[in-house]
Image: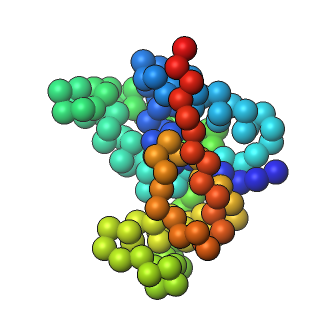
């Protein structure tokens, strides 16, 4: 069995049943869980998701109340393991090893968290920039429009 990190775009689509991606994402995650794979969420994604869920719709948010956003995050936390932030030394080592500079430092944080948790795959919709030699396999979903 493999260990997958669910990317932020996956978390968004799991929440939004009106999205063309929702069913494909839900099916993919359900299949991974049913097959016994471990699915993880990076802890830093939760505040970003809260922001999106509670932001007004006119500002590209989902306009949820704090109570509804809490219920959604609680459901994610109950179903998936939440990763803690990697130590600074770990992500700095990834940034240095893979020459990740500028905004790409976020990828170093992601890699360090995934390595600490033993994750081998990243389930995503948007192909991420990950160095080829980093040992993480991106699994990029294609939508099935029904």
> In this view of the protein, which residue sits in the foreground, 129 or 57?
129
On screen, 113 above or below 93? above
Residue 5: x percent and y percent?
60, 52
User: In the image, what residue occupies the spot 53% across and 70% down?
Assistant: 131
Q: Residue at x 65, y 33 (%)?
A: 28
Residue 36 sits above or below residue 103 on the image: above
Occupied quadrant, residue 64: top left
103 vs 146, left or right, is left
Residue lying farthest to the top in this orientation: 146
Specify whether residue 123 is in view: yes
Seen at 46% across and 46% down, the residue is: 126
User: Which one is in front, 69 or 93?
Assistant: 93
Q: Would you say residue 43 is visible in this rendering?
A: no
Instruction: Say above or below: 83 vs 24.
Output: below
Residue 93 image position (x, y, % from top left): 51, 84
Q: Looking at the rendering, in which quadrant would you find the C terminus?
A: top right
Is residue 52 rendered to the left or right of residue 118?
left
Q: Nearer the viewer, residue 35 or 116?
A: 35
Q: Position of residue 34 (x, y in %)?
A: 78, 33
Image x and y of residue 78, in percent: 62, 38
Residue lying at 39% horizontally and 32% vertically, measured from the top left: 69
């Amino acid at each position: 069995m493999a260990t997958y990190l669910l990317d932020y775009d996956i978390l968004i689509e799991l929440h939004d049943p009106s999205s063309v991606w929702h069913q494909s994402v839900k099916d993919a995650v359900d299949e991974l869980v049913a097959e016994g794979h471990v699915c993880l969420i990076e802890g830093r994604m939760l505040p970003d998701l809260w922001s999106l869920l509670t932001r007004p719709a006119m500002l590209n948010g989902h306009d949820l109340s704090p109570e509804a956003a809490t219920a959604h995050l609680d459901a994610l936390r109950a179903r998936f393991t939440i990763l803690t932030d990697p130590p600074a030394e770990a992500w700095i080592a990834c940034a240095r090893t893979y020459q990740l500079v500028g905004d790409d430092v976020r990828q170093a944080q992601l890699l360090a968290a995934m390595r600490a948790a033993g994750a081998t795959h990243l389930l995503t919709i948007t192909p991420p920039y990950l160095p080829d030699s980093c040992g993480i396999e991106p699994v990029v979903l294609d939508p099935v429009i029904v």
